[in-house]
Image: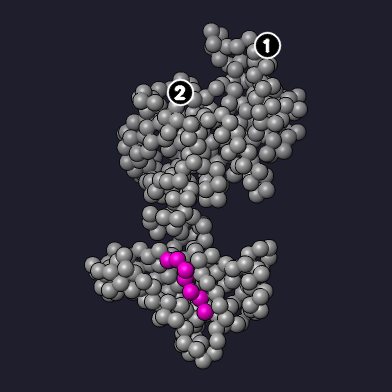
Amino acid sequence: MSIEIRNVHKQFGNFQALKNVSLDIASGELLALLGPSGCGKTTLLRIIAGLETPDSGSIHFSGADTTDVHVRERKVGFVFQHYALFRHMTVFENVAFGLRMKPRSERPSEAQIKKKVHDLLSLVQLDWLAERHPAQLSGGQRQRIALARALAVEPQVLLLDEPFGALDAKVRKELRRWLRRLHDELHVTSIFVTHDQEEALEVADRVVLMNSGQIEQVGSPQEVWDHPASPFVYGFLGDVNLFHGRAHEGELHIHGMQIDLSEHSGAKEGMASAYVRPHDLEVARHVPGTVSPAHSMVARLDRAIAVGPTARLELVPLDDAGVELKPSAAHQSADNAPANTENTENAVIEAHISTQQYRDMGLKEGDTVVVTPRRTRVFLDQAAGI
């Protein structure tokens, strides 16, 4: 079942939840709607389901206009964050519920229902829990039962709204791998909503990045990670260092460091923002009396967290005299807004190197290092002269 979304608008009072959203979803695809709270991803999912009606625009299932088709007739299955299992029913009864609620003319016999339920419980690897009640299950088990119940009615489209959001990190990781394997076996067109970028990149065939009711970028996990289309996408997909500097005739100047800007060679005395992921920063010991390369900056190691295979280094940039520079650079995580350049606190740059490299270098907090970006993405600000 393919889905075509065309020019969908949705407003709640003065809040515009969706703004001219268009999207094509291929039959059998596992698609992630990814973005922060309030970006419109759940509203879009509910409109696809028929739980909300768009103010304008249309939804087509395999070419047929379903914009005004009732939710019961869309043949969609739902899995919600908080399971929504019936507490007074056993696992078997929960999974059988949708089948028993079908119109008499479409309802399977009890023997057929029993076989189908046990087949589904085997599929989600929980057939041994058929007679238990939801309160006797773990969170991960309850979510797998919720998925089995959604699949029982043989949906043409499976919709999952933050399906693993209420679970702890280890269970989430196990379940998203399991969901990927299950989808590869069933090939039901599936759309899941998440604000967890790691979850979206690991599970989905394609990722739709949403922000303020609009689609920022659509692509495979590798495409959106390697080629972010906007500053928002770059900042949302994992940790990133954000630098503000001056772009002029093919170079970006930040704290005395020069970054090649050949793709924006026409910019003159314009402000620009440079994004560098922590693992794209090369760190070396600073040798006193030497001049750092033009494409590097000097920094002080303020804090090191060397736990596991990766050492996270928090660095404070220094000028030629060894004085801390004012904050025109800042580390930004996926959950934070872009750094405020008016902030008077010292900026912190985050670099990731292997723990073995950190130990081999013999670094300790307070040491001076040279930081060199291996890969930088630059976006010109609106005011940049071209």
Residue lying at the far top in this picture: please name it.
105
**Quarter of the figure that contains the C terminus:** bottom left
The Cα–Cα distance between marks 2 and 1, rounded to whole angstroms, is: 26 Å
Return the x and y of residue 198 as percentages of the image width and height.
55, 50
Residue flagged by tag 2: what amino acid is it?
Arg
Mark 2 packing: few (<14 Cα in 10 Å), some, or many (20+)? some
Q: Residue at x 68, y 39 (%)?
A: 139
Within the magenta stretch, is there residue 114? Answer: no
Could you tell me if residue 15 is visible in this image?
A: no
Q: Nearer the viewer, residue 92 or 253?
A: 253
**Is disc 1 placed on a helix, strand or loop?**
helix
Is residue 362 positioned above or below 208 on the image? below
Give the magenta part as a residue range: 370-376
Mark 1 packing: few (<14 Cα in 10 Å), some, or many (20+)? few
Is residue 238 positioned above or below 284 on the image? above
Which residue does the numbered mark 1 point to in the structure image?
Answer: 111
Return the x and y of residue 264 as percentages of the image width and height.
30, 66
**Quarter of the figure that contains the N terminus:** top left
Residue lying at the far left in this picture: please name it.
386
Residue lying at the far bottom in this picture: please name it.
289
**Is disc 2 placed on a helix, strand or loop?**
loop
Which residue does the numbered mark 2 point to in the structure image?
Answer: 74
Closer to us: mark 2 or mark 1?
Answer: 1
Is residue 287 left or right of 11 when viewed as pictured? right
Q: Nearer the viewer, residue 335 or 205?
A: 205
Q: Earlier in the sequence, mark 2 or mark 1?
A: 2
Return the x and y of residue 164 as percentages of the image width and height.
60, 42
Q: In terms of image quadrants, where is residue 301?
A: bottom right
**Which mark is on residue 56?**
none
Q: Nearer the viewer, residue 154 or 260?
A: 260
Return the x and y of residue 36 as percentages of the image width and height.
48, 50
